[in-house]
RNA sequence: GGUCCCGUCGUCUAGCGGCCUAGGAUAUCGGGUUCUCAUCCCGGCGACAGGGGUUCGAAUCCCCUCGGGACUGCCA
């Protein structure tokens, strides 16, 4: 069987969009599933809007997501190819030079809309005489090359592996430009040529390309190329149900990355947008996704990108990842926190930081929540008592309790959580009071707050010395 | 306007003619666990867009209406 080849073809005019990321992911999953190849093709033929920076950032973000490509191409490196084929079509009478300027075109378009006619190119340059061409050229006009659509084309069928055949009664387009006046190819042309030349066997792209695919059918025909298979993914929508855009909040994977989302959470969430495994599983490892991925399980209705579900996924992964990795991921966020200076981070030490982060994980759903996190603050100096904590400390037994604890902990080297529990129990019995009367003042004194992570763990991490110091400072 | 796609809880989805008084997840609400918060566990609320057919039987098939979306460039 022939190797399956798919591609992801972004244009570097912005950061990698989550919609694009999903398309890339589905292509990658498809390739992996079938032991095929994923081709990354940068469609940078729009000289004005494309940039090297965006190209790099897209590659970085794909890598971050764990989407690796097998081959890499850039359309700007391939301009001669497109030009050659465009000329070939002109030569064969399947395309022609058009001297209309953008301004003229725009004006006619406007007029057509006003008059209720479809705003399509009227084909006026189809049969220009040599003199007419020369006159235009003398005027300094740079021609484009337009593809000549068949005169009679009742309807087009786009075979779609996901939605089934899609029939177009008519194409809402006239002869379209395949080579722009600056010599760069337009999207549909470069796309068809490259998909063919790169031996793409399956084109999996978003639904906004549906009408493009229809147009491309003619190009395949005119060029004498065999068609690949096609599949169109539904659109990703914002909360307002319109195409996910800047207005809908964060849309680039870069932004999610900066906000402390884990790539595995992102991948998991994206995978479940438009695809499901048909059982009730929600959390998938990469391997499971590859194993279970199938075109049959793709739905064709559009989906809203739900941040809350992503947060849940992220929280799940934060709780599950290896502690070492979590520490690595968390550190930059801690360092970026205003309330934590380098000195106090250093003072805490690696081991205590490790344990503290492990303790705080369950309450965090994205790494950015670690910045100025209340629970983390417990482990740094400079605590202030909240009003509620003050109140707890003013309870009748609080002073006695805390003094008893201080007596127990003084001079100790370290404390395990179990030893803390034991001490609390003994103190409770010694003073003949309830657990709350011990735990609450202890928490208030040590953390300055009345809620937070398990106090026995907190104390164990801080150690007896710091704990005693803190208690003494409120007595 | 034209062309095309789509329509099950707020959101992501299961369902492919009887297993559906429509299942799961998330969000939300309530309860439990805990010194407390978070986690976790248990429970509640919550949907087949509407109308016609076809059929013994329709969320599932057909038609119409309505609604949403995309495209309609020398952007991709």
Image (cartoon, rainbow, N blue to C red):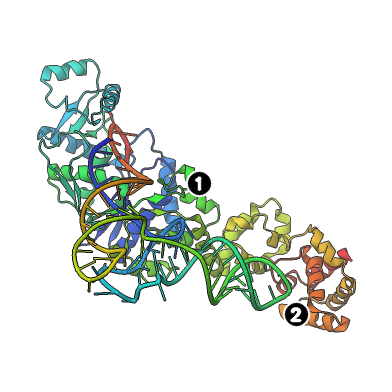
Secondary element type, mark 2: helix
Which numbered marker is on residue A127?
none
Total marks in image = 2
Q: Quadrant of the N terminus of chain A?
A: bottom left
State yes or no: discs 2 and 1 in contact (Cβ < 8 Å). Answer: no
- Quick check: do tags 2 and 1 share a chain? yes
Instruction: Pinpoint residue A388: horizontal percent, then vertical percent.
Output: 80, 62
Look at the picture and state if A191 lies above or below A390: above
Q: Is residue A185 visible?
A: no
Q: Residue at x 87, y 83 (%)?
A: A430
| Residue A24 position by quadrant | bottom left
Q: Nearer the viewer, mark 2 or mark 1?
A: 1
Which numbered marker is on residue A249?
1
Instruction: Pinpoint residue B14: horizontal percent, then vertical percent.
Output: 35, 68
The one of B49 and A170 positioned closer to us in this rendering? B49
Look at the picture and state if A47 lies above or below A264: above
Q: Residue at x 70, y 64 (%)?
A: A349
Q: Which residue is mark 2?
A: A421
């Amino acid at each position: 069987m022939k190797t399956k080849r798919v591609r992801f073809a972004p244009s570097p005019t912005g950061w990698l969009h989550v919609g694009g990321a999903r398309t890339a992911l589905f292509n990658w999953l498809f390739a992996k599933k079938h032991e095929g190849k994923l081709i990354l093709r940068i469609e940078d033929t729009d000289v004005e809007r494309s940039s090297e920076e965006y190209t790099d950032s897209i590659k970085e973000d794909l890598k971050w997501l764990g989407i690796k490509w097998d081959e890499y191409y850039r359309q700007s490196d391939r301009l001669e190819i497109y030009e050659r084929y465009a000329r070939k079509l002109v030569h064969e009478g399947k395309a022609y030079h058009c001297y209309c300027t953008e301004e003229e075109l725009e004006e006619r378009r406007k007029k057509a809309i006003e008059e209720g006619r479809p705003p399509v190119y009227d084909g006026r340059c189809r049969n220009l005489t040599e003199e007419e061409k020369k006159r235009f050229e003398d005027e300094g006009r740079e021609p484009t090359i337009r593809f000549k659509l068949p005169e009679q084309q009742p309807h087009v069928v786009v075979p779609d592996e996901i939605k089934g055949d899609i029939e177009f009664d008519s194409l809402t387009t006239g002869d379209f430009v395949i080579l722009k006046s600056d010599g760069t190819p337009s999207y549909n042309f470069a796309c068809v040529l490259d998909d063919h030349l790169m031996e793409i066997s399956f084109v999996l792209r978003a639904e906004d390309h549906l009408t493009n695919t229809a147009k491309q059918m003619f190009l395949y025909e005119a060029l004498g190329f065999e068609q690949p298979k096609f599949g169109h993914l539904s659109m990703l929508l914002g909360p307002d149900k319109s195409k996910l855009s800047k207005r809908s909040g964060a849309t680039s994977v870069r932004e999610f990355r900066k906000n402390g989302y884990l790539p595995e959470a992102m991948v998991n969430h994206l995978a479940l947008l438009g695809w499901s495994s048909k059982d009730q599983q929600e959390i998938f490892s990469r391997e499971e996704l590859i194993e279970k991925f199938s075109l049959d399980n793709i739905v064709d209705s559009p989906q809203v990108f739900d941040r809350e579900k992503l947060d849940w996924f992220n929280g799940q992964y934060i709780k599950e990842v290896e502690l070492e990795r979590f520490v690595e991921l968390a550190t930059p966020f801690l360092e970026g926190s205003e309330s934590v200076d380098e000195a106090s981070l250093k003072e805490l030490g690696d081991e205590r930081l490790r344990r503290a982060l492990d303790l705080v994980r369950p309450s965090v759903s994205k790494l950015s929540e670690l910045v100025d996190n209340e629970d983390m603050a417990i482990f740094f100096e400079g605590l202030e008592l909240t009003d509620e904590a003050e109140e707890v400390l003013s309870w009748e037994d609080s002073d006695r309790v805390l003094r008893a604890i201080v007596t127990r902990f003084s001079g100790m080297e370290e404390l395990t959580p179990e030893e803390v529990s034991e001490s609390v129990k003994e103190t409770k019995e010694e003073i003949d009071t309830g657990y709350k009367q011990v735990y609450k003042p202890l928490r208030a004194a040590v953390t300055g707050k009345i809620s937070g992570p398990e106090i026995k763990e907190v104390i164990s991490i801080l150690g007896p010395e710091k704990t005693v110091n803190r208690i003494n400072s409120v007595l």
